[in-house]
Amino acid sequence: MSEELVREEIEQSEGVDPSTLTEYYDRLRIMVESMEVDVLKSEKGNKAAGTRLRKNLRLLKKTSAEFVKFSLGKWFKYSLLFYFLIFQEFVFLFDIFSF
């Protein structure tokens, strides 16, 4: 992917919060791909590319943390629903068998 296309894709996706794990993963993948050029330039001694790389790494770290929180939130939401349903089943069984 060329650098311009990657940057365009990042700019388009920044205004929209991802709503699925796949969307978060795609955003992280695009961010990593966009850093490739700056990594190569930084290895050759380009200081501006090193600065851009560090800035993008901080953004990647922030987005990764949001991804972790999002994935835990999804898991937590579904696990709470599961435990609620089990609790309801126990309450129902208790009502049936209580004298």
Image (tube, rainbow, N blue to C red):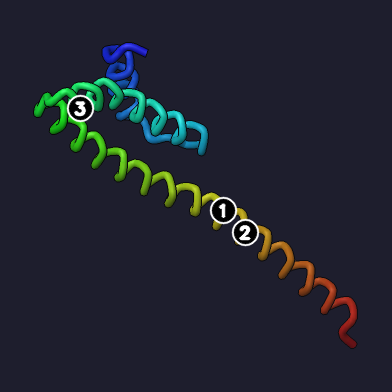
Q: Is residue 23 shown left or right of residue 52?
A: right
For badge 1, the amino acid type reads Trp
Q: Are marks 1 and 2 in contact (CB under 8 Å)?
A: yes
SS at circle 3: helix
User: Sequence order check: which comes first, mark 1 or mark 3?
Assistant: 3
The residue at the point 24 percent across, 23 percent down is 40
Mark 2: which amino acid? Ser
Image vertical order of residue 49 relative to residue 25, above or below: above
Distance in Å between CA atoms under marks 1 and 2: 6 Å
The residue that disc 2 covers is 79
Judged from this view, the residue extending furthest toward the left is 47
- Residue 43: quarter of image: top left
Secondary structure category for the residue under label 2: helix
- Between 2 and 73, the residue placed more toward the observer is 2
**Residue 75 in the image: above or below residue 67:** below
Give left or right: position of 43 versus 75. Answer: left
Determine which residue is flagged by label 1: 75
Give the image location of residue 61, x and y in percent: 31, 44
- Observer-nearest residue: 65 or 57? 57
Mark 3–mark 2 distance (CA, rounded to whole Å): 46 Å
Q: Residues within 10 Å of mark 3 (few under 14, many from 20)?
A: few
Inter-mark Cα distance, 1 to 3: 40 Å
Residue 36 is situated, as x and y percent measured from the top left of the image, at: 30, 24
Q: Quadrant of the N terminus?
A: top left
Location of mark 3 (residue): 43
Mark 3 residue type = Glu
**Residue 77's image quarter?**
bottom right
| Cβ–Cβ under 8 Å for marks 1 and 3 | no
Residue 30 numbered tag: none
User: Within 10 Å of the Cα at label 1, are there few (<14), some (14-19), or many (20+) other Cα atoms?
Assistant: few
Quadrant into which the C terminus falls: bottom right
Q: Is residue 64 left or right of residue 90?
A: left
